[in-house]
Amino acid sequence: MAREPRRSLSSLRVGLVGCGGRGTGAAIQAISADPDASLWAVADAFPERIEPCLTNLTDELKAQHGAGADSYLRRAEVPRERRFVGLDSHAALLDSGVDVVLLCTPPVFRPKQLADAIAAGKHVFCEKPVAIDGPGIRSALESAKRAKEANLALMSGFCWRHSTRERETYEKIHAGAIGDIVAVYTNYNATGWIQPKPRQPQWSDVEFQLRNWHYFHWMSGDHIVEQAVHAIDKIHWAMNGRLPRQVTAIGGRATRPNLPETGNVFDHFGLVYDYDKNVRAFHMCRHWPNSPSDNSDYLMGTLGTATVNGWNDTHVITGPNAWQSQAQRNDMYQTEHDELFASIRAGTPYNDGVAMAESCLMAIMGRMAAYTGQVVTWDQALNSQENLLPSDWTWTERPAPGVAVPGTTKFA
C-alpha cells in the first residue's frame, strides 16, 4: 500500500478497525484524549456490528460528559460512506483520510493490519496481542522498526503499563527496592470468555469460527495469548526487558465443554520460563467456572518481595525497603490514549512496539510448549514457521482445527 502525503494535523482523524466492545472503548478514549480528535471512519467484518458500536459510543459519551457532551458527540459522527464492511475493510479505512488507526480486531488480523497502517503512514494504537505466531511476531517487529523510521506512533494495548500505581511499583523494583530478582510468579485466573455462539446454517466455516474467534487458536492464539498475555507482559516488565532462554509448560481442557463452538483452545496453562543467572518466572492461567479469579504478581528478590494486584489494589514491597503505593489511581485505558495523542502532538511519537512483540512472543512460546509437550527456546519460537493465518481471507470453508495433544502435536 503506497503511503499518501502526510496531512496537516491541526485535527486528528481517527479510524476504528473492529467495532466490538474494546473497539468502542478505544474510540471513546481517543475522542476524549484530544479536543481536536474525531472519529472519522469505522470498519468491521460484520455490518451489524457498526450501528451498535456508534450508539454505545454516543451513549457513553453522554454518560461521561453530561451537559458538556455536545462537542464530543459532534466528533463521534461517522457518515455512512465512511463505514466499511468486510474481511479486508481496513484497507478502505486507511484510504479514507484517517491519521490515527485503532486496531481492535480479533488477533489473527493484526499483523497485516498493523503493517498496512504503518505503510500507509498512520499512527497506530494496537490492541494486544499483536500476533499469534512466529511469522506474525516477525512482521510486528518489522512494523515497529518502520514506524520508528517514519516517526509514527505505535502504542500497544498493554494497559497496565499506564496504571499509575503499577508504574510506581515497577519503578521501585527496577531501582533495586527488592534487590536482584530471583523469581517472578504471575497468574490470570478467570471464569472464561463471552458465551460461544452455536453454528447457524447460513454460516461458512470461516464465519462460524470468526463469530467464536476466542475459542479457536488460529484466531485468538488461545487464552494465554489473547488474555493472560497481560500477566506475562508484567513478567517482561519486571525483568526490565530481559528475554527468557526457554519455557516448559503444561496445559489442557479440564472443564471446557467439547462443543463445536468452543473450538480447540485449552482452559488452563502452567509455565516455567528460564532466564540466565538461574532466574525463573512462573505463570498460571485458567478458565474454570465456579473457581476464584485472581490476577496477582509476586516478585522475589535478594532484599525482599513485591506483591502487585491491580484488581484488588495491592501494591506492596516488603524487606528493608518496605513500601506501599500511595499514587493516585487513574483510568489506565484513558491514560494510554492521552499519552499516545500527546506524543503525536509533540512530534515525539510513542513507540513500544518491540516490547509489545516480545511479551506476545513469550505467551506464544508458552502455548507452543504446552501444545507440543516440548521445551521451546526463544529462538525456536521467534523463527517458527507455524503460520496460523489463512493464505487469503474469504467467507469460505476451513475445517476447525483439533485440540492439541502434548507429546503428539508437533512443533513447527
Image: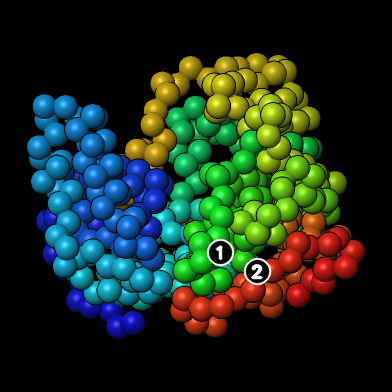
Q: Position of residue 152 (x, y in %)?
A: 33, 64
Applied colour scheme? rainbow
Q: Position of residue 44 (x, y in %)?
A: 35, 62
**Quadrant assignment for the N terminus:** bottom left
Please report the residue visible at 24 percent of the width from the left and 45 percent of the height from the top.
55
Labels 1 and 2 touching (C-beta < 8 A): yes
Q: Is residue 130 visible?
A: no
Amino acid found under the numbered disc labelled 1: Gln
Q: Is residue 223 left or right of residue 213?
A: right
Q: Position of residue 211 (x, y in %)?
A: 49, 59
Q: Is residue 216 visible?
A: yes
Label 1: few (<14), some (14–19) or many (≥20) C-alpha neighbours in 10 Å: many
Please report the residue visible at 66 percent of the width from the left and 50 percent of the height from the top.
224
Q: Is residue 131 left or right of residue 406?
A: left
Q: Position of residue 408 (x, y in %)?
A: 88, 68
Q: Nearer the viewer, residue 324 or 211?
A: 211
- Vertical placement of residue 47 versus 338, above or below: below
Q: Is residue 71 left or right of residue 381?
A: left
Measured in 3D between alpha carbons, the distance from the residue under mark 1 to the one under mark 2, in whole angstroms, is: 8 Å
Amino acid found under the numbered disc labelled 2: Ala
Q: Secondary structure at mark 2?
A: loop
Q: Nearer the viewer, residue 365 or 218?
A: 218
Quarter of the rendering containing residue 262: bottom right
**Quadrant assignment for the C terminus:** bottom right
Label 2: few (<14), some (14–19) or many (≥20) C-alpha neighbours in 10 Å: some
Residue pointed to by mark 2 = 400
Please report the residue visible at 44 percent of the width from the left and 38 percent of the height from the top.
162
Residue pointed to by mark 1 = 209
